[in-house]
Image: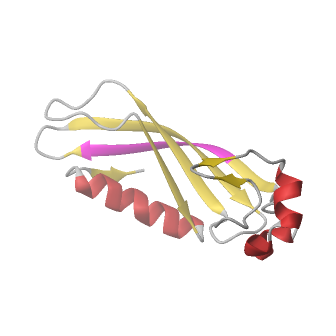
Amino acid sequence: MENFPGYKGNTWKIFHLSTLLYETPHIYACKKKFETMPRYNVVFESNEEIYGIVPKAYDWVHYKSILKVKDGGKYPVSLEMTFVPPHPFAFNMPESHSIKGASITDVYEDVVKFFNKFGIEFRS
């Protein structure tokens, strides 16, 4: 540890990042330039109204959401849901929820699963 640049006893001397990367053989993997994640373009975007019903109480649950489809990535489809009050009588719903998936069908399948956790039937 004594031959590590910047080490003095129990304290560390602060180096500029480029100095540390090129003078330190222990951090060889960091010499490569940092790559940024690719940005994908939004191909399709729409506003969605999602409704569900609590069967026993006949309370309606309403979410406004934005469906986005991008032109690449592991999960190119995303759905950002925002709750529209009033809350059902028996429980409170999350104010916002986001779902990502490989296709629109996968995203809406997750919406049905999300509603089923609260005992709500998907009606849309």
Q: Nearer the viewer, residue 64 or 98?
A: 98
Quarter where residue 36 is shown: bottom right
> Which stretch appears magenta?
46-53
Image position of 119 (left or right of 73) = left
| The stretch drawn in magenta includes residue 107 | no
| The stretch drawn in magenta includes residue 48 | yes
Quarter where residue 37 is shown: bottom right
Q: Nearer the viewer, residue 8 or 18?
A: 8
Outermost residue on the top side: it is: 86
Residue 35, can we see it?
no
**Residue 12 image position (x, y, % from top left):** 66, 48
At 88% from the left and 56% from the top, the residue drawn is 19
**Residue 21 image position (x, y, % from top left):** 83, 63
Q: Is residue 12 above or below residue 96?
A: below
At 33% from the left and 61% from the top, the residue drawn is 113
Image position of 99 (left or right of 116) = right
**Residue 110 image position (x, y, % from top left):** 42, 62
**Residue 60 image position (x, y, % from top left):** 28, 36
Identify the image's colour scheme: rainbow, by chain, secondary structure or one colour.
secondary structure
Q: Nearer the viewer, residue 85 or 99?
A: 99
Q: Quadrant of the N terminus?
A: bottom right
Image position of 12 (left or right of 14) = left
At 34% from the left and 38% from the top, the residue drawn is 94
Looking at the magenta stretch, what is its main secondary structure?
strand
